[in-house]
Amino acid sequence: MPPKNLDPSSSPRALLGAELRVARERKGLSQADLGELLFVSGSFIGQLESGTRRMHLEFAQQIDEILDTGGFFVRNCGAAAKSKYPDHFAAAAEAEALATVIREYAPLIIPGLLQTEPYARAVFRAYQPTATEETVDELVTNRLARSAILDNETTPLFWCVLDEAVLRRSGDEPKILADALRHVAKLIRSHRIIVQVLPFSAGFHAGMLGSLKLMSFDDAPPLAYVQGMGTGRLFDDPATVSQHTLTYDLLTASALSPRQSLALIESVAEEYEHDLQA
């Protein structure tokens, strides 16, 4: 008899993953065995079971058939798939909340986990100049809610590389950027995050094709997320994740040291504050 339907109010994705593990083991299949039947990797099955990946309807239908679960996964994957984030980012945001290590390269804006409310609002307004205030309010609220994962003093380890362009893009809102940079500096000085700045003087570098986020987990294989304009893709293939990890390593090698980076961040913030007072 298949298990009862999930309660959507109680971490449905995690519960769905736990039920998948039970059903798979009942059939005597390994993660690799089930992955082969679904034409995905065994690590992808592991990420479904650990809750780091969402189960989409196409997989739920096949899993119900293979594991003989009476339509349980089709009935419940809708609750597990609900997200307050855009489709292209939802899976990455959900995985981010479970990661033990997050490494990120930001070429254009301060990473979402480090943004202040005015900075996030300015970013979303620039993306969507005709959106209603209610829409922007919701986007800002959801973005700031993600930063709660940094409330834990040690986990996840967050390490980012900021392109110097991130520090210089103030436009006609220097106070917003100055305050945002001060916020980043405060997190650095409290030893909560590690930040390196990739200076313009580094010239051509390994990350020129766009942003990158690497996520590691205690009980699941690592993931890599790359994002473009209105698009994003999450990778679990070991070779692809390894290539993106090399990219990040090259970026850190070209960047300023954490101490030099903090000095530059605070110096640029001071410049903006001085201009405001002039």
Image (cartoon, helix red, strand yellow):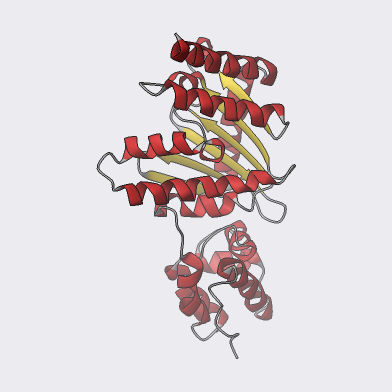
Q: Position of residue 36 (x, y in %)?
A: 56, 65
150 vs 225, left or right, is right
Residue name at image x 57 percent, y 64 percent:
35
Residue 206 is at least partly visible in this image:
no
* For residue 171, above or below residue 248: above
Q: Looking at the image, which is closer to me, 192 or 233? A: 192
* For residue 193, above or below residue 67: above
Which quadrant of the rendered structure holds the C terminus? top left
* For residue 236, above or below residue 79: above
Residue name at image x 51 percent, y 86 percent:
70
Q: Name the quadrant containing residue 13.
A: bottom right
Q: Name the quadrant containing residue 192.
A: top right
Q: Position of residue 52 (x, y in %)?
A: 59, 57
Name the outermost residue toward the left.
130
Which quadrant of the rendered structure holds the N terminus? bottom right
Residue name at image x 59 percent, y 40 percent:
214
